[in-house]
Amino acid sequence: MTDESPSDRRDRGVSNTRTESEASRERSGRNEPATRRSDAAVERGDDRTIDRTGEPLLAVEALQTHYPITEGWLRREVGRVRAVDGVSFEIHEGETLGLVGESGSGKTTLAHSLLGLEERTDGTVRFDGERVSELSGADQRAFRRRVQLIVQDPNDAFNPRMQVGKAVAEPLALNGMDDADRRQAIVEDVLERVGLAAEDTDRYPHEFSDGEKQRLAIARALVVDPDLVVADEPTSALDARVQSDILALLDEVRREFDVSILCISHDIDVVRRFCDRVAVMYLGEIVERGATAEVLQRPAHPYTRVLLGSVPSLDPSDREFVRPLTDTIPDPADPPSGCRFHTRCPAVIGPEDADLSEETWERLAAFRFTVQVGELPERIEMDDPPDAATVHDAFDLPDNIRDDEVAAGVEDAVTALTEGDLDQAEERLAAVLPSVCEQQVPETVDVEGRPVTCHRYDTDIDAEPRPWCE
Amino acid sequence: MESSDRPRFERVDWSEIDTERRLVTPERALFVLGLCVVVGLFLYDYYYAHVYLVAQWAVTPIDWAVLIGLVGLVSYGVVPAARNRAAVRRTYESIRSRPVLSGALAFLAVFGVVGTVLPVLLGRPELHFGYAYQPPVGVTVDAGWSPNCFGTIKRGQGIQRYCEGSALIPLGTNGRGQLMEAMLVAGARPAIYVVLFTAAFIVPLATAVGVAAGFRGGRLDDLLMTYVDVQLCIPAIFLYFIGYMYVGASLLLLLVTFGLLSWGPVARLVRSEVLQRREDGYVVVARSLGGSDSYVARRHVLPNVTNTLVPAVFHLFAILILAEAGVAFLGFSNVELYSWGSTIAEGLSPDRMRAHEVWWISTVPAVALAATVVALKLAGDGLRDVLDPRGGR
Amino acid sequence: MRMGEQPSTTGESLLSVSDLRTRIETDRGTVRAVDGVSFAVDRGEAVCLVGESGSGKSVTCESLTGIVPQPPASIVGGSVTFDGVDLRDEATDLRSIRGARIGHVFQNPQHALDPVYSVGDQLVEAITAHGDVAKRAARERAVDLLRQVGIPRAEVRVDDYPHEFSGGMAQRVAIAIALAGDPDLLIADEPTTAVDVTVQARLIDLLRGLLDDGMALLLVTHDLRVVASLADRVLVMFGGQILERGPVDRLFERPAHPYTQALFDSYDGFEQLPDRPSRNELPADGCRFRAECPHAVEACSGGDQPPFHPVDGDTEHTASCVYYDEHREADAILDAGRAVRPAAEVDADD
């Protein structure tokens, strides 16, 4: 390890890198016809512009998909899992949109709702200007043909009993192409174009590797000439180099046939390389969306920052993470009030009338929400309550709190904890440390041309957005 | 690779292709045609024919039911097989390589032909009261059992005479002089009818219910499974006895009551498999392509379910054959059917103390029954192995 | 020890592996899953074994303590020494080592945990297997272990069943069970692959904490980012062999072996790759990567894998590639790849 600071080292790395790699490539004679060397979105901006002024191919507005929780044989509804809770976005022709989120974010439910595999509870989906729910008969069948799905697990994507030729031809057959020879010819052609062989039509899925199966899945999606492909985690099950391979194939497909792609992924690297635009989902809502380069380099929403900041850096000298306040992901059937992210948000807004420094508030916020959620640190247990000093130490509570009311509340909470009363502690803290983030649902505000749903960007609220470089 | 007349997917003009689901498929056409033939036969029988429809066949309601079932099995079983000849050939090769399975299937094929065709041609077994209780070849019995002895008479102690079986009547005769071979053939008929009826009506019903419950879920699922649970509590034999009081002894009644009460477990099995596979990638894709539940079930779920379904179905056949034989044994079936069960009972009835002397009357049909049940079980297990994608191909 | 290869540190290593070879019988023939692997792990050190599927990294770990199923596998050569004990000696009681001295964590926690027993029961079982501990004391230790791995309200959760834990929490439980015997070395095979990225970050924090407490870690992963965040030293595996090894900062700055470079490349953009042979068709001699290597030359075939040569004169960072042979008049000396580039990163402090 050298004495350089991480940023110095990185700066040196940048300038070194470009010339070194170029030189070495020249010397070694390595040619890279289709390689993307730098940020995909930026580069693509140069050789392709996507017309975002016209009618979008897919327009989703306030989409909701809820699952009822029922009790009893009469199926009385006692609650709802709000898997998708008010999502809006657009995809234009030839565009790739990445949908990023963790488990429980609702991204797969969203994809299935778009395709009609799940029933929408509310909201509209417009495809090519027409409302999908109003389509019937031939138009509905046309919609089904023009939107295709690539499922998550390539090992699961094919019927083990069916030859892959028949499987890839299935969309053709289901859409009315009766001539078996014609189907076979088209399938053989498509297989060769995705990098497989025409003879492979007779084989069974288990005879192919994961990467090859994913090519088959792409072929199957392509064979009916779709306009939009929904790719659910297209590369998650694949090795790094095979991932690269498949993304290149998808990109070629996109460019050559002008297919739009909705790419669902939990992997930021995939989105970074492959998608023009990205939408970040948390607990059924989109918290931020915009051009990939912008969102990834200047994330506005605190959840996006936590998400990106949790991805380990490829630089071994940089091992810092951006940490949320608490780790527990709330139950989608009972999401937090106001802004859903407030229980974990490192940028949660403090009480307006309290006199607290930023740093104090941050520590108190951590205290309040870890107690609320029950994620108590190691030394604290309610069976064998600790003493006040341990509580102060474990939660890293500030010694001098300027605001008397808050200080009193905090002391009460500490006392409650020493008595093993978690609920009382929670109550006191909630009383003295209210936050607009739990009281109001944030409005969607335009930040540098992209929509962000966070109170800090709302000019009506007395809180400034935090800078990204800390 | 570039050739202008090579079909390319992006050049397909989808507006020209009619995506309407076809109403007329080969299976449906054949099925309707077959039904028409049956209806024609029925009308002929009703208006023109006297006692026999053809040869020695006096047609009863159960025969019509089985005929309809056969039409269904052929149109929905044989036609897809004809379309998929390569797969059929592979399956055939796979069966041939398994001697036990081949033997069981050969036995069942013979059993099937014997049960359906021979009774039509031969009619009921002829009565020869003069030659009752004739022993099988090589076996001797007290000559007092019958006025005449077809074979040779042997002398014993004092005035004891024995009748020895003749090779011309290899299996002997029963208490009414009917040849045991004829009784076997006649008894095969109710047994094969059980199998055909179950395969044509019960199994599809159970499968359809299982698929509907599995795919739709919700209230339909609750309703159907509750019904299945209730149904499992009703002993079929009681229902049969109640029906027997009103309708009398009828094979159709037996099949309907036992059949209707035995589809539950198969339905549950199918439902459970559907639930497991609903979220499999290829099923989701097929549904997203617009495949109906029945299409997805037929094409993607059921073929992958054979491991559990095939043995269960053959087990059901075996159970129902035994049920029919049992009911006949108890005397609650139509004597004209000559079911193996009733023949077994006959063999025990003459003189309790001496029934063992004419042991072949019970034993011969019992062996046939046992062999059939064993063959069904072996066939079920063997076919499961053959159809298992992971089995040695 | 192979020619040119250096032991990673001076002095006694905790774990020392030399020329380990494991074969697996498949219906397509014998696969040399581990084909001459040598490395060492010191106390308190984190060594990462990086590779794609089929590289042999998991089989290597399972071969160390003999948990790889034999048959169809068989460990046919090499030595494994742990704290002076020869693990390949038949006289060694491997069961007393597993769990007590060496802990294992696997990829999918729901597989490692038995669904019909409570988490506490499984912990107590692990605790009492390696020491005569009274039931009550074992239960207290179980709760302590859960706390140590960061399960909130451990005293309540100890009686929960595995399915009541989310993926990340279940993995922590699996780690707790691995720690039950107070091992010196933790072998973790893709422990963060099946979880979300924020959960992965917390698991990495946990592992770092364990490292700070003095535990040694052998981590198997395909994810270079996880390697960057945890490793002290890196071993790059392909086709059953180690192709490059070195301290993490130096290896990441200048990946030397063409395979390593290809791995790093794949993080940067995407490209269509030429047809690759399947796992079973890898060459059995020389450099196993040569079929896919853009720089393959004649010298790459034949004999054992190429010896390890220092990269840029650094004896700790070596690559098994002919292009680094300082005595060779190579037609094109391969320059050790590109450094880690910030444009390729999603970084918190840009």
Image: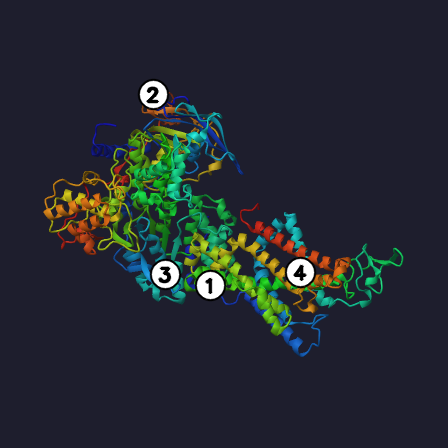
Label 1 Cα neighbours within 10 Å, binned few <14 / some 14-19 / many ≥20: few
Left or right: where C99 falls relative to B92: left
Give the residue type at disc 3.
Glu
Observer able to see residue A294: no
| Residue at 38 percent of width and 46 percent of height | C161
- The disc at residue B112 is 4
Comes first in the chain, label 1 or label 4: 4
Q: Are marks 1 and 4 in contact (CB under 8 Å)?
A: no
| Residue at 10 percent of width and 44 percent of height | A402
Query: Which residue is labeled 1 in the image?
Result: B226
Query: Which residue is labeled 2 in the image?
Result: C10
Observer able to see residue A286: yes
- The x and y percentages for residue C326 are 36, 22
Q: Are marks 3 and 4 in contact (CB under 8 Å)?
A: no
- The x and y percentages for residue B117 are 69, 64
Give the residue type at disc 1.
Thr
Label 3 and label 4 in one chain: no
Left or right: where A199 falls relative to C61: right
Tag nearer the camera, 2 or 1: 1
Task: Determine the secondary structure under disc 2.
Answer: loop
Tag nearer the camera, 3 or 2: 3
Q: CA distance from mark 2 to mark 4?
A: 82 Å
Q: CA distance from mark 1 to mark 3?
A: 16 Å
Query: Which residue is labeled 3 in the image?
Result: A71
